[in-house]
């Protein structure tokens, strides 16, 4: 049997059917991608924080920071007071050392001199 010759109209019709089939496949693929993208965006939107959530968190952080700053200032004030007390104690110790040295230099020789005169030497 001789091969059937296709007419130009028949080959154009076959080509149009193949193009239509491919376009349907492409359209279905684009629709699936859109659905997957929409699902992913919905999932991301459910997981992200809202401004209201962040405002509450920001307020809590600011309050904690303010409390921390107050505590730091109180500790610094306490340190300054303790340093002043230590400085006063150091001054008193040096004064006591000075008085003790003065007593040893002045009073002890006088007492020794008086004791020696009393003994008759």
Image: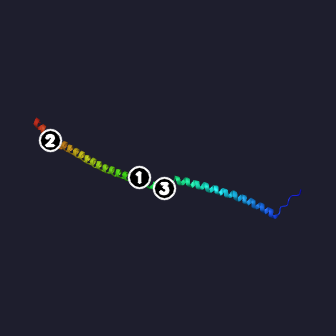
Q: Residue at x 32, y 50 (%)?
A: 74
- Give the mark, 1 or 3, whose residue is nearer the N terminus: 3
Where does the C terminus fall, quadrant-wise? top left
Q: Give the x, y percent position of residue 58.
A: 43, 54
What residue sits right under mark 1 in the picture? 60
Find numbered disc 3 in the image and state the secondary structure of the residue it sits on: loop
Q: Give the x, y percent position of residue 34.
A: 62, 57
What residue sits right under mark 2 in the picture? 110
- Give the mark, 1 or 2, whose residue is nearer the N terminus: 1
Tell me: 13 left or right of 84.
right
Q: Compare residues 58 and 13 and report the one nearer the observer.
A: 13
Q: Calculate the distance from the C-alpha at mark 1 to the C-alpha at mark 3.
A: 16 Å
Q: Residue furthest top?
A: 119
Find numbered disc 1 in the image and state the secondary structure of the residue it sits on: helix
What residue sits right under mark 3 in the picture? 50
Depth check, mark 1 against mark 2: the one in front is 1
Q: Is residue 108 above or below residue 16?
A: above
Q: Is residue 93 above or below residue 37?
A: above
Q: Compare residues 25 and 59 and report the one nearer the observer.
A: 25
Where does the N terminus fall, quadrant-wise? bottom right
Q: Residue at x 80, y 62 (%)?
A: 10
Tell me: 100 left or right of 35.
left
Residue 37: quarter of image = bottom right
Mark 3 neighbour class, 10 Å CA radius: few under 14, some 14 to 19, many 20 or more:
few
Q: Residue at x 78, y 62 (%)?
A: 13
């Amino acid at each position: 049997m001789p091969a059937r010759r296709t007419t130009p109209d028949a080959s154009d019709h076959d080509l149009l059917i193949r193009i239509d089939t491919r376009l349907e496949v492409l359209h279905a693929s684009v629709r699936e991608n859109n659905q997957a993208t929409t699902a992913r965006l919905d999932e991301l939107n459910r997981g992200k924080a809202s401004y209201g959530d962040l405002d509450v968190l920001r307020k809590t952080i600011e309050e904690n920071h303010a409390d921390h700053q107050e505590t730091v200032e109180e500790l610094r004030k306490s340190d300054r007071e303790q340093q002043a007390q230590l400085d006063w104690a150091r001054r008193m110790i040096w004064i006591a050392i000075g008085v003790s040295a003065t007593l040893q230099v002045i009073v002890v020789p006088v007492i020794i001199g008086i004791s020696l005169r009393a003994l008759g030497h």
